[in-house]
């Protein structure tokens, strides 16, 4: 039986928020970083934005947040935040996301006006053209299975190849864990009758969707514009989540085949693997590569912009804030 989760106390909350190895997720670039916090009160004082915890005796511990270097703050359960603190985070271009425990669900988000549309424009550029959209789908397959895909491969063929590989993975894991024949099933109407592996896989997948949603929101991408999935506000979330299922959620689910509470065990184990795999920054880096494959070196995040550009079909963009009426038009 799974171990009982220890109860949260004010003293443990102070230790958690003061420990950068637990609170600060690894950085992706020089200015793209994520902070996860729970069981704290985030306020603005005369010095800056800080996370507060109070002891049983009324002693308050404050940890100041590096707002200027944060691109995304994930607020877990038991967290409250004041309007002045939200205003400061927005002024620094920080996305604030309300999540489940460990950041594994995404309930809502506030996106600052200064968040660049760079990655959204990359996404729409590829999504809006069938050939470019198919090229992204091929890159996703390569990233998922580390297998080259011929340029003539159709999406129908990709679906068949993906299905065969997942069936083979299910069969291999079922043999390793000696659970007999396994068939993936998701039926909300018969939830209680499903086997532990299916229950654990559904639970872990939900956690994975949440962390992917948080990463896409922080980048400024649209969760709705998928390249393989479509017809839902989470289409792109499902696309990106598929990149990690064979490595993380599927083996995790099979390892819980004899669990008495596979759903809860899957959530706890996923949070552990989230830190182990450093998944959040990995997702951001993978999305950047998928949407900008021709850029050399690490892609700058370009998270905040000071000025809006104007679109031009020839040059791509021209500076805003300029009166172009003073220029003489070119001769036809």
Image: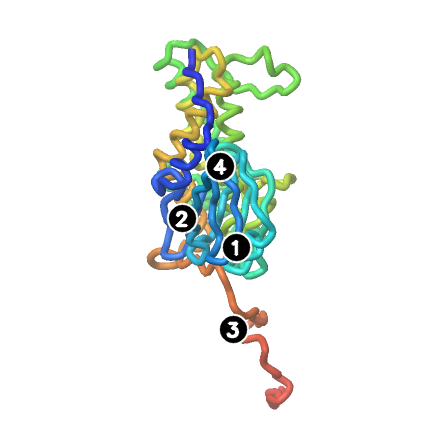
**Badges 2 and 3: C-beta atoms under 8 Å apart?**
no
**Badges 2 and 4: C-beta atoms under 8 Å apart?**
no
Front residue (pair 236, 256): 256
Kindly report which numbered mark, 1 or 3, lies closer to the viewer in this rendering. 1
Assess disc 3: are there few (<14), some (14-19) or many (≥20) residues with their C-alpha within 10 Å of its C-alpha.
Answer: few
Q: Is residue 90 above or below residue 109?
A: below
The image quadrant of residue 314 is bottom right
Residue at screen point 48% across, 49% down: 72
Q: CA distance from mark 1 to mark 2?
A: 23 Å
Q: Quadrant of the C terminus?
A: bottom right
**Which residue has dot 2 on it?**
285
Q: CA distance from mark 2 to mark 3?
A: 27 Å
Check disc 2 and report its element: helix, strand or loop. helix
Give the numbered dot on residue 89.
Answer: 1
Front residue (pair 11, 304): 11
Check disc 4 and report its element: helix, strand or loop. loop
Left or right for 30, reference 228: left
Pinpoint residue 87: horizontal percent, then vertical percent.
57, 56
Check disc 1 and report its element: helix, strand or loop. helix
Q: CA distance from mark 4 to mark 3?
A: 61 Å
Kindly report which numbered mark, 4 or 1, lies closer to the viewer in this rendering. 4
Q: Earlier in the sequence, mark 1 or mark 2?
A: 1
Kindly report which numbered mark, 2 or 3, lies closer to the viewer in this rendering. 2
Q: Is residue 103 above or below residue 292?
A: above
**Badges 1 and 2: C-beta atoms under 8 Å apart?**
no
């Amino acid at each position: 039986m799974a171990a009982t989760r220890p109860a949260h106390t004010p003293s443990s909350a102070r230790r958690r928020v003061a420990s950068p190895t637990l609170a600060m997720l690894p950085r992706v670039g020089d200015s793209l970083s994520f902070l996860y916090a729970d069981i704290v009160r985030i306020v603005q004082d005369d010095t800056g934005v800080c996370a507060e915890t109070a002891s049983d005796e009324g002693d308050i511990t404050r940890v100041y947040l590096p707002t200027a270097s944060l691109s995304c703050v994930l607020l877990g359960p038991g967290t409250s935040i004041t309007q002045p603190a939200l205003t400061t985070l927005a002024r620094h271009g920080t996305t604030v996301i309300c999540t489940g425990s460990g950041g594994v669900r995404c309930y809502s988000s506030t996106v600052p006006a200064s968040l660049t549309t760079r990655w959204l424009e990359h996404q729409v550029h590829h999504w809006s053209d069938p050939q470019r959209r198919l090229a992204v789908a091929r890159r996703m397959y390569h990233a998922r299975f580390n297998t080259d895909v011929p340029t003539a491969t159709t999406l129908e063929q990709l679906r068949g190849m993906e299905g065969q590989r997942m069936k083979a993975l299910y069969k291999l894991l079922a043999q390793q864990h000696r659970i007999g024949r396994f068939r993936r099933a998701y039926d909300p109407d018969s939830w209680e009758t499903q086997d532990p592996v299916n229950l654990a896989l559904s639970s872990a997948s939900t956690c994975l969707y949440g962390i992917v949603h948080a990463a896409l929101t922080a980048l400024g991408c649209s969760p709705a514009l998928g390249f393989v999935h479509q017809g839902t506000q989470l289409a792109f979330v499902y696309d990106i989540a598929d990149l990690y299922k064979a490595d993380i959620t599927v083996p995790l689910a099979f390892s819980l085949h004899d669990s008495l509470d596979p759903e809860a065990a899957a959530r706890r184990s996923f949070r552990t693997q989230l830190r182990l795999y450093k998944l959040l920054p990995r997702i951001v880096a993978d999305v950047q590569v998928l949407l900008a494959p021709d850029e050399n070196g690490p892609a700058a995040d370009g998270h905040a912009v000071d000025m809006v550009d104007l679109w031009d079909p020839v040059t791509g963009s021209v500076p805003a804030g300029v009166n172009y009426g003073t220029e003489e038009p070119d001769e036809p």
